[in-house]
Amino acid sequence: MLIQYEFLKILRKRSTLIIITISLMLTGFLFGLPIIQYQIYSQDGVIKGTKGIAYEKEQYAKLSVPLSEEYIKETIQEVQELFKNPDSIGYDGKESFLIGDAYWNKIAPRETLLSLIANAYSKPNEVFGYNQFPDFDITNGAFFYQSIDKKIETLLNSPSRALSQRQKEYWRSMADKIDMPFQYGYYKGWEVIISSFELLIFAILSICIVIAPVFSGEYQAGTDAVILSGRYGKTKLITAKIAASLLFGTAVFILHITVACGLPLAVFGIDGWDLPLQIINTVIPYPFTFLQAVFINIGIIYLVLLAMIGVTLFLSAKMKSPYFVLMILIPLLFIPMFLTPNGTTGLYNLSLFLLPYRSTRPEFSKYISYQFGGFILDILSIRVIVYLVLAGMMLPLAKLGFKRHQVA
């Protein structure tokens, strides 16, 4: 009954409804932007919105294939043959490319796939396109997956990464679990979600704003004396306030996730949920499908939320005004947006990747790992541990902080 009372106390505030409504509208707008702005080009011109999405899905219907060595070799050979016709080649002063029917009929429908194949052969930090295919020698085979392995080794052995031997072995072991050949297909809806996860920081902020007065609001209203002198004021009521805050945060988070994932999947479709992440970037070491990747990162963001609820409640128990709470929370959540990592190693970078904003971003392709003696944890695992521990620490401290509050 106490939890229900405290939950309804949070929910019935006019400010709560306004803040959450604005936050949901903002989430819908931000995750809907890729739909609004979507456009694709055909030989007849630009196709926008849902018509463009339907057109692209139709093109992909022919590309749902396993990327076997034979398929890769045949694809490269087809493009090489197109470059043998001088009438189909354009030149911009720097590089050659295909034009006319050769481009629109043979390249445009699968240019994303061709770029994926080409970049398997590029060096790290280089970007290849289909126009590099004429330079490829595939007489004895494409060696697509061998090239990916070499590229991964180059990344692991890069001096700038400064990875230990154990870290290299850790990433090799993870990459070995990836199923080959890659299954290719349409995955746009999932790509939009994965690339937009950090926008959920606004949902976290809205929840924290709403629960900031849970304890400090009692100080402002002068009801702290009544609560703390009551029979259950220092025990069950404090627990009920914390439980209600967690329940509210979870319910609002589910609403935001439903909007954030529902919009792209409703328009772009759920196609590609079972495809491997490697069809976005061949050097991603995690053996996840798109669905698994989305669920894992949602789980991490939820843990970030729980920890931030704990921090908010702790500050609320310590400060006499919700505004003071927000003066600390807002910089904590948003200053990291303006801090850019200069690498993937070093105390500064490894700390930055664990801050709340950065922790909403998957970082699937960056090989970020933490070594504790002979024990290695990747960035996803360490985030789970850090935010579970933080939530586990801050929630009891919030309870203790209000319990020990000295009434004026």
Image (tube, rainbow, N blue to C red):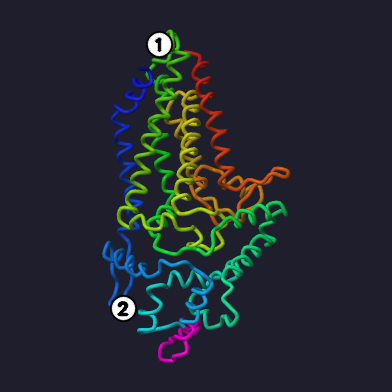
Where is residue 140 shown, x and y percent of the image?
Answer: 60, 80
Closer to us: 48 or 271: 271
Q: Mark 2: which secondary structure?
A: loop
Disc 2 residue type?
Gln
Mark toward the start of the polypeptide (1 vs 2): 2
Determine whether, in the image, residue 168 is placed left or right of residue 198.
right
389 lies above or below 231: below
Where is residue 64 shown, x and y percent of the image?
Answer: 41, 66
Residue 43 numbered mark, or none: 2
Disc 1 residue type?
Val
Residue under the point 66% across and 46% down: 376
Residue 226 numbered mark, or none: 1
Determine whether, in the image, residue 242 is placed left or right of residue 39.
right
Instruction: Using the rendered image of the protein, determine whether residue 402 is visible from the camera's viewpoint.
Output: yes
What distance separates the C-alpha of mark 1 from that of mark 2?
A: 74 Å
Closer to us: 277 or 16: 277
Q: Quadrant of the N terminus?
A: top left
Instruction: Using the rendered image of the protein, determine whether residue 408 is visible from the camera's viewpoint.
Output: no
Magenta span? 79-96
The quarter of the displayed image where residue 221 is located: top left
Where is residue 15 shown, x and y percent of the image?
Answer: 31, 32
The quarter of the displayed image where residue 139 is located: bottom right
341 lies above or below 105: above
50 lies above or below 304: below
Where is residue 104 shown, x and y percent of the image?
Answer: 36, 79
